[in-house]
Amino acid sequence: MKVKKLLWIDDMEHWASSAARNLEMIASKYGVNLKVIWAVNGEEVLQILMQYDFDGVIMDFHMEPFNGDKYIQDIRNEDHLQHIPIIFYSQDNSADLSALVKNLRGVTTVYRPNLEDNIKELFFGE
Amino acid sequence: MSENLQFKVSSALKDIIGKDLISDDNMAIFELVKNSFDAHSSEVIVRFENIYSGSAKITIIDNGKGMNYDDLVNKWLFVAYSAKKDGTEDDDLDYRSNIYSKRPFAGAKGIGRFSCDRLGKVLYLETTKQEQNPKTEVLLTEWEKFESDIKKEFIDIQVVHDTLEHNSFHRSHGTMLIINELRSSWDRPKLLRLKSALAKLINPSVSQDQDGFKILLEVPEEISNDRFHEDQHNIVNGEVRNFIFEALGLKTTRISSTISSDGLYVETELRDAGRLIYRIKERNNFKLLHNLNFTLYYLNMSAKLTFTRRMGLSSTQYGHVFLYKSGFRIYPFGEPGEDPLKVNARKAQGYNRFLGNRDLIGEISIYPPNEELKETSSRGDGLIKNSTYEELEAGFWETLRRLEKYVVEVQQWGISISDESNYDLRSRASNLIAKLTGSDDIIEFETSDDFLEIIEASKANSAESIVNNLTRIALSSNDQDLALQARQAADRIKQIQLAREEAEREAEQERRRASEATTKLREKISENLFLKSINTTDFEEVISLLHHIGIYAGTIDNNLKGISLRVQNSIDISKEDLYDIIRLLSFETKKILNIVAFATKANFKLKTENKEVNIADYIREYVSNIIPSVTDSVIKVSFIDETRLQHIKQIKPIELNIVIDNLVSNARKVRATNMQIIAKEDSENQLTVDFVDNGSGISEENIKKIYDFGFTTTDGSGIGLYHVKEILESLTATIKAENNANSTGVTFTIRFKQ
């Protein structure tokens, strides 16, 4: 079974953990052993990314103390993280996420209810 | 057989002591101006003509004592001889001539006249001595004659001489130099730089009127351009004045330290914004120094701005600590970019503790005789480094450190004592004076007339030590005035201490009154956090509420989908897992219900889940604005705030709402008609909130089970109090239930830990 590791940053823990549990079940149907590491804000993201190899980053938009786009910029500023796939999502469909990351390559912007489908497409090969 | 030989001097000596020694054009003009000053002129004119037409010339005319034929031969033409140096320069002057009596000499090398060579190839000199029946002597020197063959001896080069009945510069006595065939060109910017440099040549603290010496710059071809400018620093023609310290006025902090002419004492005065902070007289520990002064100004931001506005250039471009000997400037002291006293080098070691050149402007003035402090022959290299110079540097540092002590410790970089309201600053000034007067070297001490005002602000300890120190100084110097001042200060300090105690009592009463007023005001303001009007939800708030509803609904959907996935994939769900999911679904549903209650009632920021609030304020607002709309009128809920302190905590508002909702709902289920919520501090000043109802209470055997999931004695779900405990634990708070001792009902006590 292939192992996929995602770093997921969201301050809404209940929502994110329930979504992840469902994704783990779905992933197993596709022969993928999905492992999710959590962070409730982006402050330690760079450190975590230094310690482990991840297949992708799932980043919420609205967070404290900074919004997710700030941390995405930090990630892309690291040489070895310039190509890691990132999904950037928000519950707020009035937020123009793509404008916030328009100069950064490899960032998929998603409306929160569609996140599950996008993760499946990007990481389970559906 | 022995014989005596003589040195021969090559005509190349002229270059060595002339154009090679004088390092730039401005320096050459300085040397000539110095000569005029030393000749006791009251005025010197420096005139540039034909500067744009190719036949430029410089004319320098003074009204000094002039020279006769003997002077020309025995002084002017005598290379490296200086009558100023051997003290015979003024031997021929009338002793009754007041104007000449005290002026020190600026130059004493006997080479200043060779500056003319630096400026131009030909020098025409006319001079008329101040004596009876004077003649005018004329010399024509063509400097290139010295350059044609360096094997020729210096003394063999001819200088043309003539004697006339009258001079052509229309003064009864004085000297005129006309320098032709200039070696470099002069234009307006260069002339403005010359004027600025000449200004710095003159010691600004020596009153020019009093000393009777004036430098006039005349450039006829620039008169028309001058009319377009108003600022003195942009006008070429006119009197050269060093008004820099006038420009700074009284707005800076100034320290001035003078070593007496007999070298026994040092008198130091420190002023802040014109106000005397202290003046002390102490024994001089620099045995080689006498008759000199150090004056330093600290340039705070305001002084720097004033400087730039008045001078047309920043203080850093102008320079820093200049050195004047006998009224004239010694290079490179003060020159921008130069640091002969190593002020910046030290600043780099302690950026926040030390002043640097950019923070300073000032002067070191050396008065005659001070022969040990000699300028180097090579102009621009400062003073010869001997042991007297080392003491001069040490004296400078002592003065600078005293200024620093005031600026850093008292002003704390920039606050002036002129700020009348600054109590702390006055207190620090007082502490400084206490330390300063503690020195055994102090012979006399003086401070401002409002000295008492300054020490009034001090802490009792430093005020008392000042008085003790002053008494000691007064006794040792037998200074009756100071002794009287010390006694008055002691009496006044007692009065002040009594007045202060009284003031503190009144302040405490005021503080209590203010606290009560604040509490009332807080209640008033709090009504605005939750607005009662339905019309207050603006678009942004609605978006925020929808955002949260979306997430909570999404969480419910995720969990329901999780159950479905497990069923579809034949994954077992344990009872515990199912309970977990039900608890979560219930919790998320309650959040949505709470938001629905908010949606039309709250002007509450829900953009983030977390919010920092004063817990008591928050509960009061919630109780008065939200509870009435979500509970029926059967139960009356009121809030009593007995807190004295602010208890700020980071909370998730919705969760705290759920705690209150559940406790109110619980009371309603046990038939309570009244609930009082009382916020107060416990003995450790921690916030406790009691929810006291008058319902049927809880039986003792159940009181420990009420927080268990699913436990209920009513028709409720048995989840509410479970959620309450979970939420409070996440806030590091505890909850405890006790039946009321003297009445029906129960009290839930929540204790918030700091």
Image (cartoon, coloured by chain):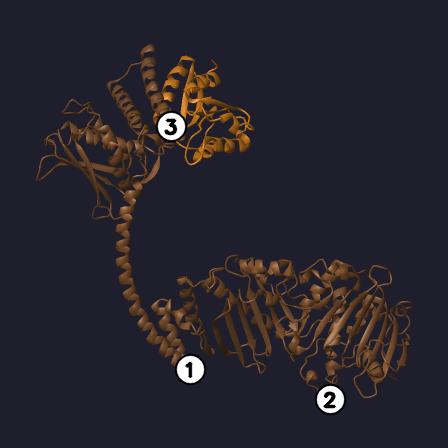
Chain colours: A orange, B brown
Q: Can residue B754 be seen in this view?
A: no
The earlier-in-sequence mark between 1 and 2 is 2
Q: Are marks 2 and 3 in contact (CB under 8 Å)?
A: no
> Badge 2 is on which residue?
B94
Is B495 rendered above or below residue B339? below
Q: Which of B314/B413 is in front? A: B314
| Tag 3 secondary structure | helix
Q: Where is residue B492 in the image (x, y as percent from the top left)?
A: 34, 74
Q: Residues within 10 Å of mark 2 (few under 14, many from 20)?
A: few
> Badge 3 is on which residue?
B542
Residue lying at 53% horizontally and 70% vertically, measured from the top left: B255
Q: Which amino acid does label 2 sit on?
A: Asp
Q: Distance between the residues labelled 1 and 2?
A: 45 Å
Q: Give the number of marks.
A: 3
> Left of B579 or right of it: where is B103?
right
> Left of B246 or right of it: where is B489?
left
Question: Disc 3 or disc 1, which is closer to the eye?
Answer: 3
Q: Distance between the residues labelled 2 and 3?
A: 99 Å
Q: Residue B481: which disc? A: 1
Is B203 rendered above or below residue B573? below
| Tag 1 secondary structure | helix
| Tag 2 secondary structure | loop
The earlier-in-sequence mark between 3 and 1 is 1
